[in-house]
Amino acid sequence: MTKIYFDTSCLNRPFDDQTQVRVRLEAEAVLAILARIENGEWTWIGSDVLIDEIEQTPDTHKLSRAKLLSSFIQENVEVGEMEEQRAKELQAEGFQIFDALHIACAETAKADVFLSTDDRLLKLAKRIEKQLHLRVENPLVWVEEMI
């Protein structure tokens, strides 16, 4: 079964300003993926770091919606020494701390794909893709291939 790890940018995408075409399309892609997860076709991997980052969302509406979505996570990765060490390696490559921890947790869970709408993260992941142990992709690009 396909294992998916969303970062916080994906979870917030359906609640972002939908007047931009790109944002609207990415939001639809995230919702389509969530529908497949709800139908039992795919598995949603989450982590302690994802929950921690959601808790830091300043917009209370986005916070409550992201928390509601995260209640559907099917498998949770706890951050341990292995994930912290891998995150340090990823930070040395230029990833921000939360992004590095997300990727480390997704790798631990053997996720098939790590999805993000963060252009900086996606560009960096493309540059070092051979050093990553999973695919990092924009949800719109990925869902177009999968559906």
Image (spheres, rainbow, N blue to C red):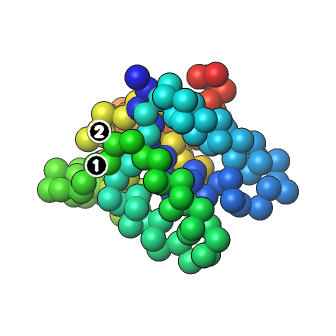
Q: For residue 63, what is the image quadrant? A: bottom right
Q: Foreground: 108 or 14? A: 14
- For the C terminus, the image quarter is top right
**Is 71 displayed left or right of 104 in the figure?**
right
Q: For residue 36, what is the image quadrant? A: top right
Picture layout, residue 145 above or below residue 19: above
Picture layout, residue 85 above or below residue 142: below
Which element type, helix, strand or loop, lies under badge 2? loop
Q: Position of residue 80 (x, y in %)?
A: 18, 56
Tag 2 near tag 1, CB within 8 Å = yes
Is residue 16 something that shows in the picture?
Answer: yes
Residue at label 2?
A: 109
What amino acid type should be assigned to the residue bearing mark 1? Val
Q: Residue at x 39, y 42 (%)?
A: 74
Picture layout, residue 50 above or below residue 127: below
Q: Residue at x 51, y 42 (%)?
A: 115
Of the numbered discs 2 and 1, the one sitting upstream in the chain is 1
Q: Position of residue 89 (x, y in %)?
A: 25, 52
Residue at label 1?
A: 77
Q: Position of residue 106 (x, y in %)?
A: 35, 43
Which element type, helix, strand or loop, lies under badge 1? strand
Q: CA distance from mark 2 to mark 1?
A: 7 Å
Q: Position of residue 123 (x, y in %)?
A: 53, 46
Within 10 Å of disc 1 (Cα), the crowding (few <14, some 14-19, many 20+) is: some
Within 10 Å of disc 2 (Cα), the crowding (few <14, some 14-19, many 20+) is: some
**Residue farthest to the left?**
81
**Is 112 displayed left or right of 115 in the figure?**
left
What amino acid type should be assigned to the residue bearing mark 2? Ala
